Image (cartoon, rainbow, N blue to C red):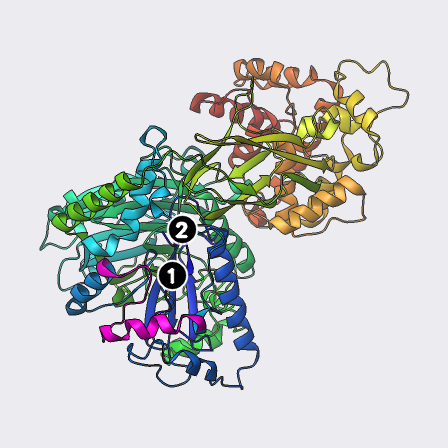
């Protein structure tokens, strides 16, 4: 490990100018995840290289400085830098092909432990590996002439501006600790194996066929061979994604469909005939399905297969929109394939951006080693992203679009593509690549034909269906649509990628592993680990319902040994923190002299809001940070919570004529402790229904009776925050945000009620009488007055929506399925039969009840 300046050498230089780009491979929200290095790809003109940075805040700072420098270069594009300062270092790196022209890189900064590797030809690899193996940690080994070593030492003073001494100098590197009984030894071996990966791996090309198809709920009526067998040679792997596999209500709400088997059979029959394939994994979320096949001769090299789903539909949970993903290890490369279906409609590009970010942050894969943190999408060597991304063509009318298509001027048309614009603005898919689009838009056609949409809506053609990738050593062979497949209103798309996969040389691996173990055996020492913390007290100001806040805690290993940390439970507590507080990561490994950043995150949801709203609980906790074989550190977390109508009972809200944030804390606690049956102590008549509920329903009644896809299309998170603040702090004349955002805010309000509209005590009774309309009405009549008023008010509003079903496309089944689970829910998880009965119960009030 690098301890002093002598351990680090300035090997190569890459200027930062307009031709420079940097892409980090970790997750978009967090550059550093404890437990593995941060991989960064840098490119300048035709050259590309990779740096592997040690995990910790130093890497984060380095990347921030690089991005800052690049931003500065972009602000003055007319001033071409000459990089004259490089002359000072020419002597030190003279043997490395010299500095070329001003603004031309050689490679980058390198560190003998965390080495970056340039893309090498096979003939160069042997020399490169030999250099890495034999490099001296005190001086720089030149690439060409060994006689330059002394020159490099003599120029050390000139390099001090770039390479600084560590604040911790160890006289003996053997003071690095490895303790098998605490798992540190395993972590050290894993860390060193990762750093030495280039010593025992080599690249071999494999072909990946990627396909995406939105089938619009249709059955497989035709062969898929024109799509899946379009390559001359059989691909090594197939990753085939579908969207809108089944549009039925059963699939949407119960995730059950016979079409999964039908389309899987159609795919298996259409795979390339010149090879045999094994089905590795299938994953589906409602209508989003991903199937992964591999040639049978490669199957034994597939390992660590995991599959996950994440819904981004209404309330951030429904699976009509979202993603499914499969991650796996192929030989020694970690690969993640994502199939997503993002929000629809031309104007909803911001919602699509939000869906992408939600998928990246929420979709996590469990690791085989339970002590390791989950893997995010971006923590893979290769990420392949397919799907109906739903980005449309903007700022052109339908005739102009069709005219450009007729002329095959796809380059001009692509400049109006929303996805291209959002990528150019670095709003989404940062670091991803997409092949040149030289085929006509894949949406929207009349089903069964090649004719553009002739319906009343006359949708503007768009490239909704896309394939992107992120990673190194990837070459695209083709990117095309398939006009011969006509079952849907979309056309399927395919791409063939040739990917350089890291294969393991068993003999070299064994040799490397044994060398690492021998070195660790020599370094074992009985030193006690210690950390320095950036701060020990944190205060979160104005915490709000469903509004994420985070503070950074920096840990620096100031001891002479590596350390393993973990937040541990306090006595008589089941978790290390209160449910509204999370430390990310909650455990990790820090090498000697290294550092890392922990995000302390506060998030109040429906389960934690009730007690915080009334003051029974406060934003207050003590975290215990424990070091294996070391001491404990205590971290204080405090804050002030802004009470919200979200997570407050119907009874309490009906007794508040003022906004909840204007109510005294004592009154909120007093109301929370009362029962709806006990109204004897109230001095004034309560409201019939909560004013906040009335505001949302009245807004929708006045503005959204004809809104298409109401309660099915998600709103924007920023708009929900504005709506929440209006309800909690005042009663404006109108609510901000779109109809979809207000609708979702209403659903979240009902979902967050501590006691549902039909209280838990009546749940079993409702199930028993669900087949009898008269008995159902009798149960409602027995509810506490405020609950009964809310139920009847909502039922009346939903009946008004049904009167406009021709325009809003709502029906009894949709509304019953959405609202039944919110108004009538169990304190335990519902099974399929119970869900069906609750819907049947609620439907009586949408079809028969008319008062």
- Residue located farthest toward the left when viewing the structure as drawn: 274
- Is residue 415 on the magenta stretch? no
Observer-nearest of 435 and 456 = 435
| 647 versus 388 height, above or below | above
- Which image quadrant for residue 784? top right
SS assignment at label 1: helix
Query: Which percent across, then down, holds residue 113?
Result: 33, 56
Picture disc at residue 114 = none
Side of 14 relative to 506 (left or right): right
Give the residue at x 83% y 25%.
Answer: 667
Depth check: give the residue in front, 580 or 140. Answer: 140
Disc 2: CA contacts within 10 A as few (<14), some (14-19) or many (>=20) = many
Residue at horizontal 36 percent and vertical 78 percent from the top: 408
List the residue tagged with mark 2.
340
Q: Earlier in the sequence, mark 2 or mark 1?
A: 1
| Picture residue at 46% right of the left edge, 59% below the top | 165
Q: Is residue 138 magenta?
A: yes
Picture layout, residue 762 above or below residue 205: above
Residue 840: x %, y % from top left: 52, 25
In the orientation shown, which residue stands out farthest toward the right? 683
In the drawing, does residue 618 fall left or right of residue 221? right
How many neighbours does mark 1 have within 10 angstroms: few (below 14), some (14-19), or many (20 or more)?
some
| 74 and 701: which is toward the camera | 74
Please report the bounds of the magenta region as a residue range.
Answer: 133-157
Q: CA distance from mark 2 to mark 1?
A: 49 Å
Q: Position of residue 94 (x, y in %)?
A: 32, 80
Q: Which residue is mark 1?
A: 6
Q: Image quadrant of residue 663?
A: top right
The answer to whether residue 624 is above or below residue 405 is above
């Amino acid at each position: 490990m690098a301890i002093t300046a002598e351990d680090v050498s300035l090997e190569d230089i890459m200027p930062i100018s307009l031709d420079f780009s940097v892409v980090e491979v970790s997750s978009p929200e967090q550059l550093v995840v404890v437990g593995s290095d941060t991989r960064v790809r840098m490119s300048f003109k035709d050259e590309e290289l990779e740096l592997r940075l040690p995990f910790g805040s130093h890497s984060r700072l380095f990347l921030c400085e690089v991005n800052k420098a690049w931003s500065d270069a972009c602000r003055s594009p007319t001033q071409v830098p000459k990089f004259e300062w490089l002359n000072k270092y020419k002597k030190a790196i003279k043997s490395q092909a010299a500095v070329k022209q001003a603004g031309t890189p050689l490679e980058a900064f390198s560190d003998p432990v965390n080495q970056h590797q340039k893309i090498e030809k096979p003939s160069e690899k042997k020399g490169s590996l030999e250099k890495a193996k034999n490099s001296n940690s005190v001086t720089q080994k030149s690439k060409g002439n060994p006689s330059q070593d002394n020159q490099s030492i003599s120029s050390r003073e000139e390099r001090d501006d770039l390479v600084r001494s560590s604040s911790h100098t160890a006289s003996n590197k053997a003071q690095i600790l490895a303790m098998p009984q605490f798992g540190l030894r395993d972590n050290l071996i894993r860390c060193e194996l990762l750093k030495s990966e280039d010593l025992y791996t080599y690249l071999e090309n494999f072909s990946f066929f990627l396909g995406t198809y939105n089938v619009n709920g249709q059955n497989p009526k035709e062969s898929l061979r024109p799509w899946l067998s379009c390559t001359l040679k059989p691909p090594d792997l197939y990753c085939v994604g579908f969207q809108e596999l089944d549009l039925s209500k059963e699939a949407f709400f119960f995730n059950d469909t016979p079409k999964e088997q039908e389309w899987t059979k159609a795919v298996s029959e259409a795979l390339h005939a010149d090879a045999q394939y094994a089905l590795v994994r299938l994953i589906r979320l409602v209508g989003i399905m991903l199937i992964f096949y591999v040639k049978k001769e490669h199957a034994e090299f597939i390992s660590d297969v995991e599959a996950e789903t994440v819904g981004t539909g209404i309330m951030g949970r429904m699976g009509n929109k979202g993603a499914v993903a499969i991650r796996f290890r192929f030989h020694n490369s970690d690969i993640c394939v994502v199939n997503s279906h993002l929000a629809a409609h031309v104007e909803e590009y911001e919602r699509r951006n939000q869906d992408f970010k939600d998928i990246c942050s929420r979709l996590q894969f469990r690791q085989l080693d339970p002590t390791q943190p989950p893997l995010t999408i971006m923590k893979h060597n290769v990420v392949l992203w397919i799907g109906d991304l739903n980005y449309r063509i903007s700022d052109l009318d339908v005739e102009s679009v069709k005219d450009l298509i007729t002329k095959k001027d796809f380059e001009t048309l692509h400049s109006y593509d929303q996805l291209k614009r959002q990528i150019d603005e670095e709003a989404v898919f940062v670091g991803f690549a997409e092949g040149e689009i030289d085929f006509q838009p894949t949406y929207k056609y009349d089903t069964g034909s090649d004719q553009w949409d002739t319906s009343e809506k006359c949708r503007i053609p768009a490239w909704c269906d896309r394939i992107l990738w992120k990673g190194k050593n990837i070459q695209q062979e083709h990117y095309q649509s398939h006009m011969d497949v006509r079952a849907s209103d979309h056309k399927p798309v395919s791409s063939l990628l040739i990917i350089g996969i890291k294969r393991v040389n068993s003999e070299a691996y064994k040799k490397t592993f044994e060398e690492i173990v021998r070195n660790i055996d020599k370094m074992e020492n009985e030193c006690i680990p210690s950390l320095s913390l950036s701060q020990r007290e944190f205060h979160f100001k104005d915490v709000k319902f469903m509004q994420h806040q985070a503070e950074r805690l920096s840990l620096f290993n100031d001891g002479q040994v590596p350390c393993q940390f973990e937040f541990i439970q306090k006595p008589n507590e089941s978790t290390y923190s209160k449910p509204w507080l999370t430390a990310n990561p909650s455990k990790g490994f820090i090498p000697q002299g290294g550092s890392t950043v922990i995000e302390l995150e506060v998030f109040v949801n429906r389960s934690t809001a009730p007690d915080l709203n009334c003051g029974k609980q406060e934003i207050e906790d003590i975290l215990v940070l424990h070091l294996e074989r070391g001491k404990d550190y205590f971290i204080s977390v405090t804050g002030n919570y802004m009470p919200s109508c979200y997570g407050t009972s119907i009874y309490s809200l009906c007794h508040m004529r003022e906004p909840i944030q204007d109510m005294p804390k004592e009154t909120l606690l007093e109301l929370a402790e009362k029962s709806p049956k006990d109204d004897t102590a109230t001095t004034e008549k309560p409201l019939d229904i909560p004013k906040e509920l009335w505001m949302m329903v009245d807004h929708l009644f006045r503005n959204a009776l004809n809104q298409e896809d109401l309660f099915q299309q998600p709103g924007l998170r920023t708009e929900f925050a504005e709506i929440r603040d209006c309800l909690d702090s005042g009663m404006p004349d109108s609510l901000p945000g779109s109809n979809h955002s207000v609708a979702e805010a209403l659903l979240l309000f009902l979902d967050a009620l501590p006691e549902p509209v039909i209280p838990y005590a009546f749940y079993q009774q409702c199930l028993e009488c669900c087949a009898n309309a008269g008995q159902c009405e009798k149960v409602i009549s027995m509810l506490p007055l405020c609950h009964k008023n809310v139920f009847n008010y909502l039922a009346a509003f939903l009946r008004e929506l049904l009167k406009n079903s021709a325009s809003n496309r709502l029906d009894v089944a949709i509304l019953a399925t959405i609202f039944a689970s919110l108004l009538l829910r169990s304190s335990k998880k519902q099974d399929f039969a119970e869900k069906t009965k609750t819907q049947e119960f609620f439907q009586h009030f949408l079809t028969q009840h008319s008062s």
